[in-house]
Image (tube, rainbow, N blue to C red):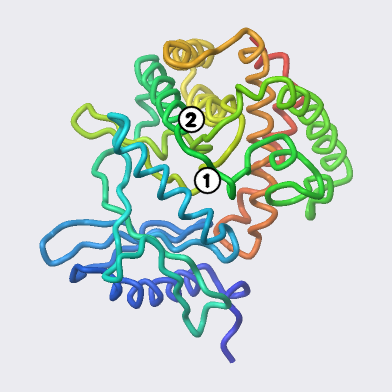
Amino acid sequence: MTCVFEQASYLTQVNRLRAMAYEVVKCYPFKVKTIEFIKYSANAIFKLTDTEKKSYALRINPSQYHTHQAILEEITWLLHIVDTTDLRVPLPVQSVDGQFLIEAKHPLITSSRFCMVFEWLPGKRRWKSINEHYAHHLGETIAKLQKSGQGIDMKHRKNWLADSLVGTDIARFYNIEKLSDVTFQEQKEITAARRAVYGKLKPYEITHQEKVGVIHADTQPNNILINKGEYAVIDFDDCGVGFYGYDLAQALCAFEHVTEADRVKSFIKLREALFNGYSALMPFSQEDIELSAYFMLASKLMTISWLEARKHNPSLRYYFPIAVKRSIDFFLNMNKHSV
């Protein structure tokens, strides 16, 4: 008997998604020679190479993650970025029917999936070699993205404000005051952390609407490619309306990891370089700086809720207790991360 998709092993899920990929590529105006699996966490990503040796990225979205209208808003922003900035971002590719978005079905996958193809951007990610120059450039890049976002309107992606980030019943992914597989004490600390963050961010959201706009929402080194000295930003799947400070927090959380593994690097110096690069192009106040630790904690709590909502993916279960511990440790040591 064939098990349902959500209960299948990770490898089985990937193989079923690969089978869907083979059907989806038939809708595009190029002849595919190879389909290479890249990753599967929420989205499944495959690298397509055609007979002309041109490469593309196929993204298969998780079920019910974004509406059709929300994905079209992502495409609109990408095209706007290309038209109005010097930033390198992945261009969406139209199907033979002139569509940017395809809804695909497969008999062994529970529900239909939205699929998109993008031009493949060459480049390498940096982690160990992250330095102050990189941090400064990333700050500038985040600012350019946010300035570009001021030129468009998103109605279906209000994902990164106080209630959606760390709310309860209307949280984006999951109410983290009702987690599974945590101890009583862990839940107590996570609940306290959520309430502390919400208590800071909700009033800030109300009084500083100028600090809210369209953001990438995942501006960390895995989504920054460097090729011949040029930087590119990929993976706009989480873009939406949110706090500008949340974008910076994604970079800061990455810098935290980098400096934990390399004692020679300084989190404070990387943070300063990031803020300097950002503030050269976008308004940035002392209050924004002081709230940066709360945005970092919001990011960590959001990761927990994201993982809780995706426990059907076997490859992600390992990270849940790690995310819980890191969030609690950060919360209990907040003063170390304050400016």
Q: Position of residue 20 (x, y in %)?
A: 40, 75
Side of 173 relative to 233 (left or right) = right
* Residue 154 versus residue 87 in the image, above or below: below
Q: Which residue is mark 2?
A: 150
The amino acid beneath tag 2 is Gln
Q: Tag 2's secondary structure?
A: loop
Question: At 56% from the left edge and 57% from the top edge, which residue is drawn?
Answer: 66
Q: Position of residue 278 (x, y in %)?
A: 46, 17
Mark 2 and mark 1 lie on one chain; the one further toward the N terminus is 2
Amino acid, disc 1: Asp
Q: Quadrant of the N terminus?
A: bottom right
Crowdedness near tag 2: few (<14), some (14–19) or many (≥20) residues, C-alpha within 10 Å: few
Q: Decide which of 122, 254 is in the foreground and name it.
A: 122
Q: Which mark is residue 238?
A: 1
Q: CA distance from mark 2 to mark 1?
A: 17 Å
Whole-percent x, y for residue 144 in the image: 40, 25
Q: Residue at x 44, y 26 (%)?
A: 147
Q: Pointers 2 and 1 in contact (CB under 8 A)? A: no
